[in-house]
Amino acid sequence: METKHVRVDAILKNKGREVWSVAPDTLVYDAVKMMSDKNIGATLVMSGDRLVGILSERDYARKVLLRGQSERQTRVREIMTAPVITVSPLCSVDECMRIITANRIRHLPVVDNDKVVGVISIGDLVNWIISTQEATIQHLQGYITGQYPG
């Protein structure tokens, strides 16, 4: 199946809809520790049920480490990226790749009716594209070699 016809909700169904988040007043140290513990490169910043920002490893490196700030004294709200670029579950894989590339980001929260329903990363998109291409190659090889049911 071509990626222009595959929607984000298919990726979320495959990978899961688990979302990790922190509050804006969380210390950067605690947020980065949680990201390390969960092996994720970014976490959403939520005020209640409302998405207010995203904190990435890049935010930490550029806005804390390089400025000589202390992650034990800096709050997430001081360094998070806001507003957040989001996509709908109906957005295509191709469109997500364009958004990620054009904005030089690695994570896209998926929002449906103002509610966060998941997060996809550049890795999720690339893995989906690769697996789709592998399936197409196998299908074509079967067809060419006569193994195609027909």
Image (cartoon, rainbow, N blue to C red):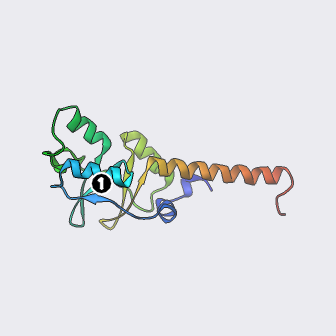
Please name the residue that numbered disc 1 is placed on: 34
Identity, as a three-letter code, of the amino acid under mark 1: Met
Q: Residue at x 32, y 68 (%)?
A: 113
Q: Residue at x 41, y 46 (%)?
A: 99
**Label 1 secondary element:** helix
Q: Nearer the viewer, residue 132 or 57?
A: 57
> Picture coordinates of residue 86 (x, y %)?
34, 54
Q: Quadrant location of the N terminus?
A: bottom right
Q: Nearer the viewer, residue 143 or 63?
A: 63
> Picture coordinates of residue 145 (x, y %)?
85, 50
Q: Residue at x 26, y 41 (%)?
A: 60
Q: Nearer the viewer, residue 27 or 43?
A: 27
24 sits left or right of 15 in the view: left
The image quadrant that residue 34 belongs to is: bottom left
Q: Is residue 54 visible?
A: no
> Picture coordinates of residue 96 (x, y %)?
44, 50
Q: Is residue 121 visible?
A: yes
126 sits left or right of 108 in the view: right
Q: Residue at x 15, y 37 (%)?
A: 69
